[in-house]
C-alpha cells in the first residue's frame, strides 16, 4: 500500500534536518554552555571569566569518576559488549534463524523484531538492542537475497523499541542502583534534613503493579502499531548486498600445534570458566541477605552473569574474543560520545542548571503530581544526558529531596524518571549507534518511525502515571 502524502512529507522533512548523533552531541554541548552563561552567571563574574569556569567544569566532567561518571560508563559499555557477544553465540544464532522463518513481509518482520526487542530489553538493554539489531540485519539480508523490497527503516526502528522499556527492566540504572544497601543515604550526604531510606526493593519499582501494567501495555500496543505501519507504509527499494558484507566467521578456529593457540581453541576451557562464573553468581544470590527476592540483581551482577553465559555458550575462548572484537567495533560511536555527554553533565551539575530546571518543574507539583512532573522533566533532561545512570546521578538527589519535602511516593517518582528517560530515547539517537552500526542504517532512516513510537509511548506512560 502507498503512504499518505503527509507520511511521505513527514519522513522527507525528518531525513533532511537530522545530522549525525555525534554532531547532535556537539550541538547540545554548545547549547548547554550558552544556557549556563545566560541563566547561572553570577553578577560579580565577567562573561569571559565565567566562560572559562564553565570550560573547567566541562573538562572535569569528561573524566568524572563519580557514580554517574567513568565507573558507570564502564559498567554500561561492558553490559553492551557482553550483551552483543551473547547475541553472537550459537544458541542465539539458531534462535534467530528460527525466527526468520516467520518474517515473510515488512509488517510481520517489523512486529516480530519489536516483540524480541521489548522482551529482551526487559532482561538486559544491551542484549535486547543487539539481538534485535542482528535480527533486523538478517531480515535485510534475507529480503536482499530474495530480491524483495522491504521497509528496512521500519524494521530497524522496531529493533530500537527495547530502549523504551529498559529502564523498567532488570538492567535499569536507577531501579538497580537504589537496591544497593546504603546507596541512597550516601547519595544524599550533601543534603540536609533528608531522610533517605537505606534501599528501595525491587518489588517497589520494577516489580510494582504500575510497572508490570505499563510493560504489558507497551508489549501489546507497540508491536501492533508497528504491524499496522508495515501494512500501510510503502516498502523501500531493494537493498544493496554490499551493505551487508560479512565481518568473518566469529566461530572460525585456527589449526595450530602451538600450545597457546590450542588452549584458545579449546572447547572445555572457556566453558569451564563459564560454569565457574555461574556458580559465583549462584553463591552471590544465595548470600544476599536483603528482604526482597531479586535484590542481588544489580549492574555488576548482571555483567558477571552475562560474562558467564558468553563463555559458556561460545565454542571457544578464541570464538568469544572474536565476538568481543566485533562488539567493540559496533559501539565505537558510543565510546567517543561518552566524554562529550559527561562534559555536558559536568556543566549541568556545577552550574546549577539541572537544579534550576528541575526545581522549575517541581515548583508546580504536589505529592500527587510530582511523579508526572518528574516524568516530563526527565524526558527533557535525557536530550542533554542520554545516559540513564548519569541522569539519575544528577536528578536522583533532587527527586529524593522533593519527594521527602512533599511526602510523595518516592518509588513511583523514581520510576516516573525512568519512564521519562526511556521515552525520549525514541528521539535521542545516542543509544541507536550500535543498532545503526549493525544494520548500516542512518539516523534519518529510523527516527521518522521512532517519533511515532514516542507519541504512542507518551500516551501510555502519561496514562499509567495518572492512574496509579
Image: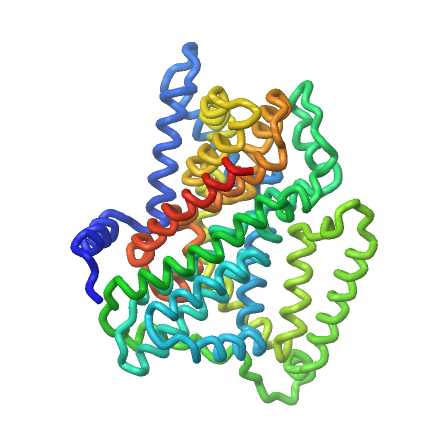
Quadrant of res 81: bottom right
Residue 227 screen position, x and y as percent: 36, 63
Look at the image and tell me in which quarter the N terminus lies: bottom left
Residue 304 screen position, x and y as percent: 68, 60
Of residues 89 and 170, which is closer to you in this image? 170
Quadrant of res 309: bottom right
Residue 347 visible in the displayed image: yes
Position of 354 relative to 393 (above/below): above
Position of 263 relative to 165 (above/below): below
Residue plotted at (80% across, 51% down): 288
Residue 63 visible in the displayed image: no
Residue plotted at (51% across, 51% down): 165
Colouring of the image: rainbow
Q: Extreme left residue here?
A: 5
Q: Total number of numbered labels? A: 0
Residue plotted at (71% across, 80% down): 268
Of residues 331 and 9, which is closer to you in this image? 9
Position of 138 relative to 77 (above/below): below
Residue plotted at (45% across, 69% down): 134
Of residues 219 and 297, which is closer to you in this image? 219
| Horizontal arrangement in the rendering, residue 102 relative to residue 242 (left or right) | right
Q: Extreme front residue here?
A: 467
| Horizontal arrangement in the rendering, residue 35 relative to residue 323 (left or right) | left
Residue 97 screen position, x and y as percent: 48, 79
| Horizontal arrangement in the rendering, residue 186 relative to residue 452 (left or right) | right
Of residues 409 and 271, which is closer to you in this image? 409
Residue 203 screen position, x and y as percent: 68, 46
Q: Extreme top residue here?
A: 44
Look at the image and tell me in which quarter the C terminus lies: top right
Amino acid at each position: 500500500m502507498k503512504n499518505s502524502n503527509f507520511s511521505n512529507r513527514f519522513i522527507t522533512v525528518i531525513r533532511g534536518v537530522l545530522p549525525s548523533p555525534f554532531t547532535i552531541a556537539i550541538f547540545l554541548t554548545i547549547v548547554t554552555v550558552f544556557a549556563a552563561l545566560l541563566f547561572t552567571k553570577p553578577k560579580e563574574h565577567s562573561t569571559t571569566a565565567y566562560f572559562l569556569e564553565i570550560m573547567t567544569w566541562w573538562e572535569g566532567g569528561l573524566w568524572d569518576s563519580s557514580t554517574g561518571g567513568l565507573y558507570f560508563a564502564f559498567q554500561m559499555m561492558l553490559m553492551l559488549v557482553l550483551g552483543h557477544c551473547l547475541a553472537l553465540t550459537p544458541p542465539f544464532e539458531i534462535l534467530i534463524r528460527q525466527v526468520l522463518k516467520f518474517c515473510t513481509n515488512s509488517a510481520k518482520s517489523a512486529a516480530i523484531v519489536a516483540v524480541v526487542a521489548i522482551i529482551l530489553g526487559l532482561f538486559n538493554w544491551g542484549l535486547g538492542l543487539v539481538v534485535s539489531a542482528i535480527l533486523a540485519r538478517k531480515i535485510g539480508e534475507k529480503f536482499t537475497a530474495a530480491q524483495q523490497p522491504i521497509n528496512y527503516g521500519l524494521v530497524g526502528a522496531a529493533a530500537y523499541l527495547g530502549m523504551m522499556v529498559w529502564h523498567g527492566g532488570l538492567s535499569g540504572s536507577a531501579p538497580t542502583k537504589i537496591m544497593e544497601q546504603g546507596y541512597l543515604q550516601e547519595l544524599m550526604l550533601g543534603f540536609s534534613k533528608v531522610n533517605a531510606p537505606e534501599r528501595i526493593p525491587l518489588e517497589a519499582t520494577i516489580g510494582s503493579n504500575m510497572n508490570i501494567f505499563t510493560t504489558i501495555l507497551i508489549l501489546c500496543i507497540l508491536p501492533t502499531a508497528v504491524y499496522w505501519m508495515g501494512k500501510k507504509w510503502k516498502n523501500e527499494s531493494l537493498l544493496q548486498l554490499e551493505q551487508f558484507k560479512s565481518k568473518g566467521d566469529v566461530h572460525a578456529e585456527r589449526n595450530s600445534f602451538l600450545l597457546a593457540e590450542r588452549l584458545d581453541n579449546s572447547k572445555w576451557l572457556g566453558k569451564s570458566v563459564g560454569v565457574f562464573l555461574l556458580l559465583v553468581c549462584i553463591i552471590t544470590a544465595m548470600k544476599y541477605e536483603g528482604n526482597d527476592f531479586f535484590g542481588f540483581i544489580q549492574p555488576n551482577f548482571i555483567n558477571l552473569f552475562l560474562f558467564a553465559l558468553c563463555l559458556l555458550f561460545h565454542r571457544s575462548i578464541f570464538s568469544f574474543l572474536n565476538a568481543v572484537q566485533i562488539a567493540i567495533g559496533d559501539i565505537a560511536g558510543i565510546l567517543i560520545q561518552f566524554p562529550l555527554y559527561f562534559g555536558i553533565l559536568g556543566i549541568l551539575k556545577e552550574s546549577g542548571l539541572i537544579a534550576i530546571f528541575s526545581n522549575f518543574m517541581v515548583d508546580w507539583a504536589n505529592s500527587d503530581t510530582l511523579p508526572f512532573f518528574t516524568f516530563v522533566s526527565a524526558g527533557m533532561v535525557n536530550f542533554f544526558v542520554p545516559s540513564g545512570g548519569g541522569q539519575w546521578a544528577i536528578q536522583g538527589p533532587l527527586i529524593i529531596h522533593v519527594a521527602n519535602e512533599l511526602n510523595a511516593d518516592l518509588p513511583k517518582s523514581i520510576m516516573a524518571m525512568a519512564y521519562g528517560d526511556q521515552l525520549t530515547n525514541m528521539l535521542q539517537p545516542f543509544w541507536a549507534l550500535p543498532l545503526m552500526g549493525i544494520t548500516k542504517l542512518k539516523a534519518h532512516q529510523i527516527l521518522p518511525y521512532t517519533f511515532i513510537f514516542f507519541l504512542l509511548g507518551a500516551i501510555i506512560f502519561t496514562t499509567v502515571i495518572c492512574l496509579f
